[in-house]
Image (tube, helix red, strand yellow):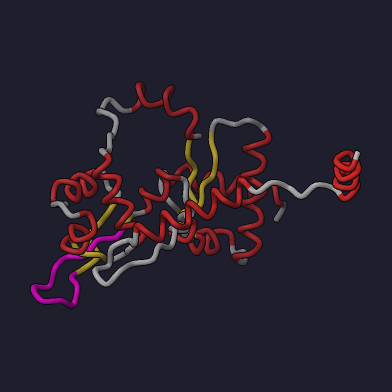
Amino acid sequence: MEIEKIKSIIEAILFAAGRQVNIKELMMALELPKDDLENVIVSMQEDYKNQNRGIEIIKVDDAYQLCTKKELYEYIYPILDKRSKPNLSNASLETLAIIAYNPKITRAEIESIRGVSADACIYKLLEYGLIQEAGKADLPGKPMTYITTNEFLKMFGYTSLNDLPELPRYKLDENQQIVIDDLIENETEIEKNENIEAPEPEREKQEQIENEEK
C-alpha cells in the first residue's frame, strides 16, 4: 500500500474516532507492524507542521489523537464550548504535581506533603478529569489512591509521565525536612565560583611586572 494511502487512512480513523486511538487498533486496521506505523505518523506530524495546518497528531502513551493546535485555542473555545474555562489554583496545581510525581498516592500522603487538607483540590481535579481513582491502597482503612489521566498529559503537552522534568535533589534531615543550611551553603559556593576572575594571560602578567620595576 502506498504511503500516501496509509496516511489518508490514519487521518480518517483519527478524525472519525474523535478520541485517542491505540497503536494496536491502527495495526489491526492497516495490518502493518508497529514500527512502520509509527514512522508514518511521525511523517504526518511533520507534514502538518510544515504545511502550517490547524490540526496536529499528538501521542499520549501508546495512543494517538487528531487535535486542533493549542495556539489556536482562543479562536475555537468561544464557538464550541460555552463552559467557563478551567482555572486551577496554585493549591490545585501543587496537588496535581504531587500526584503526577507520586502515582497511586493517597489523600493522607498528599496532605502530609502539603501540610493542609487536599479534599477540595482532589475534588476539583477529579471534576476536570485530570486525575482518577487508582484503587485502594494496602494500608489500614484501605484509603483510595490517585493517579493522573491522559487529559493531564494532553493539557501539559507530555507524551508520558517519563517526560516530567526531573525534580531537584535536596538533603533531608531526620524529620524529612529540607536542610536549609546546606541549600544556603550550596548557593554561596555557586556565587563564589561565579565571582572567580579568569587568570591573566602570561604575557600580560610579565608586562605588569616590568612596569612595576620601572
Q: In this picture, which residue range is highlighted in magenta?
A: 136-147
The residue lying at 67 percent from left, 40 percent from top is 47
Q: Where is residue 113 drawn, in percent x and y?
A: 23, 59
- Quadrant where the C terminus lies? top right
| 141 inside magenta stretch | yes
Q: Is residue 140 left or right of residue 191?
A: left
Q: Nearer the viewer, residue 214 or 84?
A: 214
Residue drawn where x is 13% and y is 52% of the image: 117
For the point 89% across and 43% down, which residue is it? Answer: 213
Work out whether residue 190 or residue 125 is closer to the camera in this orientation and state it.
190
Count of residue discs = 0
Nearest the eye: 153 or 10:
153
Place of residue 107 in the rendered image (x, y in percent of width and height, measured from the top left)? 17, 60
* Residue extending furthest toward the left: 141
Q: Which residue is more in the foreground, 141 or 37? A: 141
Residue occupying image coordinates x 32% and y 56%: 148
Please determine whether, in this image, residue 5 is positioned above or below residue 145. Answer: above
Image quadrant in which the N terminus is located: bottom right
Give the x, y percent position of residue 147: 29, 60
34 to 88, vertically: above or below = below
Q: Is residue 119 magenta?
A: no
